[in-house]
Amino acid sequence: MKKISMLINALDRISHINPEIYGHFSEHLGRCIYNGIYVGEDSAVPNTDGIRNDVIEAFRNIRMPVLRWPGGCFADEYHWKDGIGDKAQRKKMINTNWGGVSEDNSFGTHEFFRLCELVGCEPYLAGNLGSGTVEELSEWVEYITLEGGSPMSELRKKNGREKPWKLKYLGIGNENWGCGGSMRPEYYADEYRRYQSFCKNYSGNELFRIACGPSAEDYNWTEVIMKNLNQYHTKGISLHYYTVPTGDWSHKGSATEFDTELYYSTISKTLYMNELITRHTDIMDRYDPDNNIGLIVDEWGCWYDVEKGTNPGFLYQQNTMRDAIVAACNLNIFNRHSGRVIMANLAQAVNVLQSLILTEGEIMVKTPTYHVFDLFKDHQDGELVYCFSTNEQAGDKVPLLSSSASVKDGVMTITLANCSLEESAEIACDIRGFEGSSASARILTGEVHTCNDFDEPDRLVPSAHPVKLENGMLTAELPPCSVVCVTVK
Ligand code: AHR
């Protein structure tokens, strides 16, 4: 048993935790959209306008704040006009990035906005800068947001939507250093300046324009983008970083079969997110000292080898307690950087990479990662407060404890992960500057390889966990490999 002392000072309010930090990402990739989210109106799977009811309910339950779409790499090949109007007439295309399968465009703009409406989340569109045109993107914004009297607003009405939608988050391109056009940052910055000029604010709608930011430690990309885009209505720049356990993209490792060493290597690689955000923030601070531009980690999560027997282009992987620890570590990191990180989007929502949900026909499974988002949801819109811990090493490799704390409406939320596979942690946490008389907790824990599957969907679910609060001192025991959320009132 490792003893850990913590100190939380609720009088030290550090930054606001934007709900969008708990955001998600859905791409036309494998079974994320089709079968995962969208089954069509005629499906035997219970649905609303073709969207799975079980998925809507699950997304609502974790208070999903924002959903990014249609990609990913797919976004820079997507032509939005192919996905509107009569479904039978919609143009088919080949999804060249993801398995070379046929895409019938039956899920398009109207269907995506309907999904966001049903879930109650903000839509976040990734626009096509790589293979599209300025005219095409500017018309998409017009189609979605302009009240009436223009060719695109009339086309929208003809397609059954009288009122415009609200669109806040608009990404201008995706990974334009890679699948989005292999551009140099200087070239992308010029393209971005041109594209953003023609994405207008119509009918009271105000766009929050997001530029393509770096991959992992490409600090030069951030430097060039910040130098060139600061004054061009840019509100956010993105960061993409995936946790690959082996560090080798050709043999990433299995989602379910891994040894202790690979587990700790996964945690160590995921904690690298902290260094990445710190160093990109340092660059952003130099060009934007007033903090007008947010860092948006719009792709993160574990990327493993696909499950045996599945299409390698579909990126389908299982999800274990290891993923739960990864999710908790990242969400605590984002909370702690919420002064600069204003949005993050897990890759991806359903059936792809470190997903929230897996589906097979009518059955839906909530992964351990889903349950971590459920445990952490009360941080949304809270104020991050000072939280220090003495910490210990786990497996001689990584810090044992990951933590963060926030306060909202007189309630304190403390989230903790014990990353050790061997040792329990005994937490003694001195809470100052907060009048709390009761504490309760929920825990997600299990042997690290445990997952939820179609035979046993509820093998891992959160349960109540005993904690004690006496004279401002909170005590709790965290078993090995566990994620805990403590609520103090
Ligand atoms: O999430 C899968 C892919 O990873 C996305 O399409 C792309 O943006 C990234 O490389």
Image: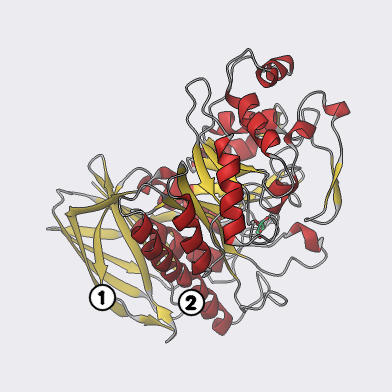
Query: Which percent across, then down, holds residue 72?
Result: 66, 52
Inter-mark Cα distance, 1 to 2:
18 Å
Sequence order check: which comes first, mark 1 or mark 2? 2
- Residue 178 versus residue 342 in the image, above or below: below
Q: Ligand 1: does it lie within 8 Å of the C-beta at label 2?
A: no
Q: Residues within 10 Å of mark 2 (few under 14, many from 20)?
A: some
- The reply, left or right, for residue 410 in relation to residue 181 is left
Q: Is residue 293 visible?
A: yes
- The reply, left or right, for residue 11 in relation to residue 223 is left
Which of the 4 image quarters holds residue 304?
A: bottom right
Which numbered tag is attached to residue 268? 2
In the image, 282 versus 353, the foreground residue is: 282
Residue at position x 55%, y 45% in the image? 193
Q: What colour scheme governs how the chains and residues are painted in the rendered image of this protein?
A: secondary structure
Q: Residues within 10 Å of mark 1 (few under 14, many from 20)?
A: few
Q: Is residue 446 visible?
A: no
Query: Which percent across, then down, holds residue 265?
Result: 53, 79
- Residue 234 versus residue 422 in the image, above or below: above
Query: Which percent across, then down, holds residue 259?
Result: 60, 82
* In this rendering, the label closer to the viewer, 1 or 2: 2
Residue to which mark 1 is pinned: 390
- The reply, left or right, for residue 110 in relation to residue 450 is right
Secondary structure under badge 2? helix
Secondary structure under badge 1? loop
- Residue 319 versus residue 73 in the image, above or below: below
Q: Ligand 1: does it lie within 8 Å of the C-beta at label 1?
A: no
The residue type indicated by label 2 comes to: Ser
The residue type indicated by label 1 comes to: Thr
In the image, 107 versus 471, the foreground residue is: 107
Which of the 4 image quarters holds residue 175?
A: bottom right
